[in-house]
Amino acid sequence: MSGIKQSVKGPDGKSLVDVAFDFSEFEKELAAFINENAEAIAKQVAKDARASVNVITGNLKKGIKAKKSKFEDGGWIIKSNAPHAFIVEFGHGGPHPAPPHAYLRPALENNIDLARQQFGAK
């Protein structure tokens, strides 16, 4: 059981009342609410990132996806399976330097208000 257990004892030290509150159902409902909203936000961020990325071959754009996290605590991630995704996002200084062409960070920043709205933050 996930929750609170409390015993109220009398002056003689004997238990008068045992109280227990089980939060496991509430925790399941809360986790489902968070996951549904996180999924919607992640998909919107991925959509916005695909819309703003520079396209040469299209591999980077096709590879941007929202994906459910494998971690126990859940969550959603936005990733690209294109091997050059980080180079485009952050640029590089190699022998032929290239400036960053951020697509993921702006997409995330543009959806902060959506996240706040989804979760009821002011």
Image: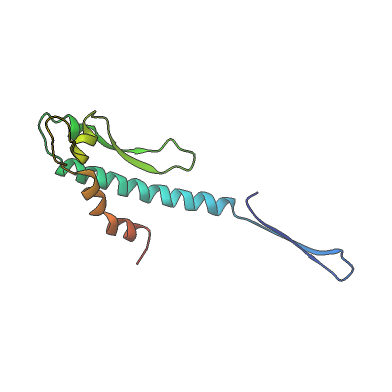
- Number of dots carrying numbers: 0
39 lies left or right of 8: left
At x 21%, y 40%, the residue is: 89
At x 56%, y 51%, the residue is: 25
Residue 107: image x %, image y %?
22, 48
Depth order, front residue of 16/58: 58
Residue 54: image x %, image y %?
12, 38
Residue 27: image x %, image y %?
53, 52
Residue 59: image x %, image y %?
17, 29
Is residue 11 shown above or below 98? below
Depth order, front residue of 5/97: 97
**Quarter location, residue 99:** top left
Depth order, front residue of 20/89: 89
At x 37%, y 62%, the residue is: 120
Depth order, front residue of 64/86: 86
Point out the image quarter for the C terminus.
bottom left
**Quarter location, residue 100:** top left
